[in-house]
Image: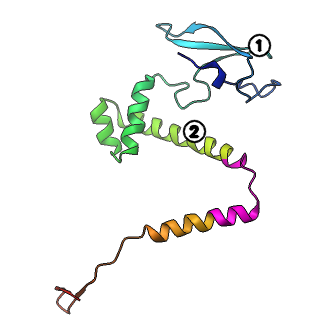
Amino acid sequence: MIELEKKFCPNKLCKQYGLSNKGNISIRGKYGKDKSRTLLYCRTCGKRFASTHSSPVFGTHIPAETIRQIIHHTAEGVGVRATARLLGLDKDTVNRVILRADEHCARVLSDLLMSLELTDTQIDELWSFVKKRKILAAPKTSKAKTDEHGSAQLA
């Protein structure tokens, strides 16, 4: 079921552009070959749009579940070719989905970071935290020393 309170009007000329939970979005009907996709309507500007408009699924001919599986495999570190074999897809299709999801995530993160309204001091503290985490996560060096022949000897 579609959660209409999370949807927003994608029309940049609309007074309620990008604002969710305003009560201006309603279901207009179904579309597609098997009428499985939902068409939404903005009561403010009168524009119709797909329910998947602001998602990486929009405009693809691949089922949303397959896209979810591709992203899951990628997050688990499975390669593109292996993912294509596992899901019975072409490797180029898998690449396109990954790139589209990447662009979507970059837009969302950019918008979220812009909406934080941090001061310079807060950003500096955040960077220090990130930098410190990288240092703490660095691999530990072995305490074994090697002789001139490359044989390891414990110290």
Q: Is residue 3 magenta?
A: no
Residue 82: image quadrant is top left
Counting residues from the N terminus, which is met first, the one under dot 2 or under dot 1? 1
SS under mark 2: helix
Residue 13: image quadrant is top right
Label 2 crowding class (10 Å Cα cut-off): few <14, some 14-19, many 20+? some
Three-letter code for the amino acid on which mark 1 is drawn: Arg
Q: Which residue is mark 2?
A: 104
Q: Which residues are magenta?
A: 113-126
Residue in view at x 48 percent, y 71 percent: 135
Return the x and y of residue 83 as percentages of the image width and height.
32, 38
Q: Are marks 2 and 1 in contact (CB under 8 Å)?
A: no
Residue in view at x 76 percent, y 27 percent: 17
Residue 22 left/right relative to 146: right
Main secondary structure type of the part rendered in magenta: helix
Q: Is residue 75 above or below residue 87?
A: below
Return the x and y of residue 120 as percentages of the image width and height.
75, 63
Q: Which residue is mark 1?
A: 43
Front-lying residue, 35 or 131: 131
Which label lies toward us, 2 or 1?
Answer: 1
Front-lying residue, 58 or 44: 44
Residue 16 left/right relative to 65: right
Q: Is residue 120 magenta?
A: yes
Q: Count up the numbered dots.
A: 2
Q: Is residue 58 above or below residue 130?
A: above
Q: Is residue 33 above or below residue 150?
A: above
Separation of residues labelled 2 and 1 (CA atoms): 26 Å
Residue in view at x 29 percent, y 29 percent: 88
Three-letter code for the amino acid on which mark 2 is drawn: His
